[in-house]
Image (cartoon, grey):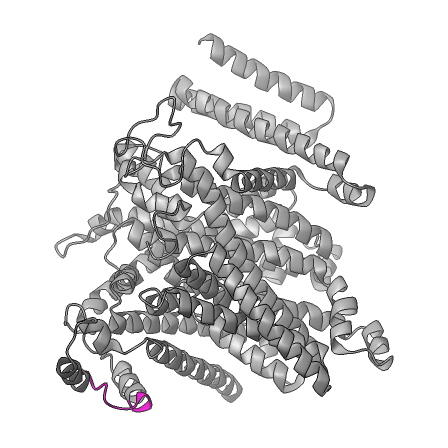
């Protein structure tokens, strides 16, 4: 019996008595069962086990406090309508939003936050942490902490670009398929069936084995990007310029310009092998987005107001933009979050396998692989980038969970 | 009975059709390479004579369509040609590895399926309690973590710090079955963690969906005890979704295995695939992809057929 144990049990018992007194049933159950578990753990594992439990509970309480404060902060600065929605968010969603916010800050201001450059070699390999290097050095002697910060920029940006492209193609195709129906719908649906019946990681590996080598150059990636943009744009042009030749001509001219400048712009931001990765991800995930969008839009299309709009003589593009899209935003936004998680995990997995983002770019997946040998010495450093991946996906999932719950009225 | 056979036959036909399309995708994708495989093998400095000789040897002088059907017919008889890196027969290198992968997946499934179904039903019954919320957060965390994160955490705590299990799942021929189970426990446990979370959430959703239906409410209103509502009324209808959930997750296991195999240096087919992708050994890549896709489709098919067999309304379509 030392002071720590006495304080520990006093706090727990006091807390459960207070909870019982104020009729907080669930809090009481939680606290008291924790007390009972601690009795057993304390006997089996001694003070050490109790310390671990206390640390975990403390961390949990701390993150709950952060989530609560951050949610209240958002409620305070948001406009009234949004604030009302935010007030309903559970603590997990608040935690998720806080984490996403932190990552965004880390990603955007990476060069200013990180003390060293991402490829800067500053010490010997696997040097232990000291006051200049918070997390020590990696296998080439680069600062681990700076690389984790830069990873927030590189990995997330890549995953975001992949998701956005998958989403543009998938959602546009889905909306158009639901509105027009017929053979167009059938062809797209069957194609997406086939692509979805190949496991995503396997398909990604197959495509990377083809496009990963000498094909990952500026010319190829420019053409592939242009083709992708052209296919996506063609969907828009089809919807906008219905049965008018002039519309088609203008649309195609605009499309050619837009897709070329898009491809050039992407080439400025990413290097060719990253562009190949983005395209692979976009091709794999757009059928999934297409499926969902088509299902959601399919439910909206049968509504009376769509019928009314059609009778008014509105065009497809108007229907999509003004009638269908506003009524299917909520599930689509949630789907965007989920898809981002899948894409992020796929890219992290590929990088971990050494086939994704190429060195010397700092990236969480490949950092785990490069420093994995440290694990066998009982060092947790390689787990930090892996944990960073997990934390972001968990955070997004928390937020998405709340949004799905809210939008569907799902009582589960 | 005839109806069922026809339904199942229809699904099987569809599966074979999709597999054919996928095999075409896998084959013709390699055709997109600049030059061809012969060029890739010999590199840029190859003389035209050497190239022509190799092309003749590999049958590359034939048109693509002819080669596709050759490849397909030999693939059906488990002949995927020779590796272009080692020159050995692809089947010989892959077959033992495929057996290893199947073993690992089966090992994980045997642990994961009972646990997740029992827990899933339990959580569905206790929904919105503290227990349910805690489980929800835990499963969400486990799903969102990359497989290698879970794998390395297990290595760190169960292999390096406590030394209970080996960190590297190397296999040899003279191992007893118990030793094999011990060696492969950590990779199996990693898979179990991921798959259990998925399966539990899906089981929970399926059961909750079911418990909301009017006939369950009717059973409750007429005073049937809760356990009887579950066992007699809910469970017979729950088999279809549960079988679906299990089959879908087994399909997921087959692909999740790739990352886990690399983490634990397990000699499975996933590792072979990753190695051959970085070495650009196309025959092996094609063979592995085809095997993975076929397994995936087969399990999805099993899910469909299982759903048909357990659902009287699907068994006797109007």
Residue A185 lies left or right of residue B217; in this view the side is left
Based on the displayed image, in which of its 4 quarters is residue A383 positioned? top left
Q: Position of residue A37 (x, y in %)?
A: 50, 27
Q: Position of residue B260 (x, y in %)?
A: 34, 52
Q: Position of residue A404 (x, y in %)?
A: 67, 53
Please say whether residue B59 is one of the residues in the magenta stretch: yes
Count of marks placed on residues: 0
Vertically, is A51 above or below B178? above
Based on the displayed image, in which of its 4 quarters is residue A232 positioned? bottom right
Residue A157 lies left or right of residue A144; in this view the side is right
Decide if residue B240 is in sight here: no
Quarter placement of the C terminus of chain B: bottom right
Going 54% across and 52% down the picture, which residue do you hit? Answer: B120
Vertically, is B67 above or below A192? below
Going 22% across and 68% down the picture, which residue do you hit? Answer: B94
Q: Position of residue B168 (x, y in %)?
A: 24, 46
Going 48% across and 13% down the picture, which residue do you hit? Answer: A5
Based on the displayed image, in which of its 4 quarters is residue A147 positioned? top left
Please say whether residue B173 is one of the residues in the magenta stretch: no
Of A114 and A176, the residue lying toward us: A114
Vertically, is A383 above or below B42? above
Residue A404 lies left or right of residue B186; in this view the side is right
Q: Which residues are magenta?
A: B58-66
Decide if residue A249 is in sight here: yes
Going 45% across and 61% down the picture, which residue do you hit? Answer: A275
Of A140 and B64, the residue lying toward us: A140
């Amino acid at each position: 019996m030392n002071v720590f144990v006495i304080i520990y049990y006093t706090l727990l018992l006091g807390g459960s008595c207070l909870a019982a007194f104020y009729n907080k049933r669930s809090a009481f159950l939680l606290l008291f069962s924790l007390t009972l578990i601690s009795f057993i753990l304390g006997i089996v594992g001694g003070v050490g086990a109790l310390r671990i439990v206390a640390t975990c509970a403390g961390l949990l309480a701390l993150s709950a406090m952060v989530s609560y404060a951050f949610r209240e902060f958002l409620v305070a600065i948001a406009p009234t309508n949004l604030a009302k929605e935010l007030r309903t968010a559970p603590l997990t969603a608040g935690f998720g939003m806080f984490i996403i916010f932190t990552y965004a800050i880390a990603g955007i201001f990476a060069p200013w936050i990180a003390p060293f450059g991402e490829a800067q070699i500053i010490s010997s390999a696997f040097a232990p942490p000291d006051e200049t290097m918070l997390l020590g050095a990696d296998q080439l002697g680069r600062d681990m902490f700076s690389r984790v910060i830069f990873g927030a920029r590189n990995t997330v940006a890549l995953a975001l670009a992949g998701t956005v492209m998958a989403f543009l193609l998938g959602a546009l195709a889905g909306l158009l398929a639901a509105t027009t129906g017929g053979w167009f719908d059938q062809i797209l649906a069957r194609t997406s069936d086939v692509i979805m019946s190949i496991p995503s990681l396997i398909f990604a590996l197959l495509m990377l084995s083809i496009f990963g080598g000498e094909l990952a150059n500026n010319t190829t990636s420019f053409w592939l990007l242009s083709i992708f943009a052209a296919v996506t744009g063609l969907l828009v042009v089809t919807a906008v310029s219905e049965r008018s030749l002039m519309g088609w001509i203008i649309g195609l001219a605009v499309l050619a310009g837009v897709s070329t400048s898009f491809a050039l712009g992407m080439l400025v931001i990413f290097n060719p092998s990253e562009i190949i990765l983005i395209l692979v991800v976009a091709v794999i995930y757009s059928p999934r987005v297409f499926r969902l969008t088509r299902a959601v839009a399919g439910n909206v299309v049968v509504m009376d107001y769509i019928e009314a709009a059609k009778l008014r003589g509105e065009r497809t593009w108007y229907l999509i933009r003004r009638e269908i899209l506003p009524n299917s935003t909520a599930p689509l936004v949630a789907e965007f979050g989920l898809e981002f998680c899948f894409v992020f995990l796929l890219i992290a997995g590929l990088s971990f396998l050494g086939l994704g983002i190429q060195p010397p770019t700092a990236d969480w997946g490949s950092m785990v692989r490069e420093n994995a040998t440290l694990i066998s010495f009982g060092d947790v450093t390689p787990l930090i980038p892996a944990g960073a991946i997990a934390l972001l996906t968990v955070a997004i999932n928390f937020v998405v969970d709340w949004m799905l719950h809210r939008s569907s009225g799902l009582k589960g | 009975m005839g109806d069922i056979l026809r339904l199942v036959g229809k699904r099987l036909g569809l599966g074979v059709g999709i597999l054919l399309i996928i095999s075409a995708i896998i084959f013709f994708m390699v055709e997109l390479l600049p030059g061809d495989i012969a060029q890739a093998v010999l590199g840029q400095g190859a003389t035209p004579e050497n190239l022509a000789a190799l092309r003749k040897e590999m049958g590359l002088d034939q048109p693509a369509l002819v080669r596709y059907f050759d490849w397909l017919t030999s693939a059906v008889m488990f002949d995927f040609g020779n590796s272009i890196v080692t020159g050995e027969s692809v089947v010989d290198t892959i077959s033992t590895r495929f057996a290893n992968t199947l073993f690992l997946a089966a090992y994980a499934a045997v642990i994961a399926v009972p646990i997740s179904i029992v827990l899933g039903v339990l959580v569905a019954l206790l929904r919105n309690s503290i227990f349910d919320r805690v489980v929800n957060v835990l499963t969400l965390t486990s799903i969102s973590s990359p497989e290698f994160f879970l794998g390395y955490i297990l290595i760190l705590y169960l292999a390096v710090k406590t030394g209970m299990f080996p960190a590297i799942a190397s296999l040899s021929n003279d191992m007893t079955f118990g030793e094999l189970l011990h060696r492969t426990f950590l990779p199996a446990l990693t898979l179990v963690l991921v798959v259990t979370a998925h399966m539990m959430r899906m089981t929970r959703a399926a059961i909750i969906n079911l418990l909301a239906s009017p006939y369950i409410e009717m059973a409750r209103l007429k005073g049937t005890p809760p356990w009887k509502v579950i066992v007699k009324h809910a469970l017979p209808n729950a088999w279809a979704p549960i079988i679906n959930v299990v089959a879908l997750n087994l399909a997921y296991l087959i692909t999740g295995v790739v990352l886990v195999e690399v983490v634990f240096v397990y000699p499975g087919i996933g590792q072979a695939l990753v190695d051959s992708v970085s070495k650009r050994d196309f025959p092996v890549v094609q063979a592995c992809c085809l095997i993975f896709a076929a397994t995936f489709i087969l399990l999805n098919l099993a899910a469909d057929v299982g759903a048909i067999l357990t659902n009287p309304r699907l068994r006797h379509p109007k």
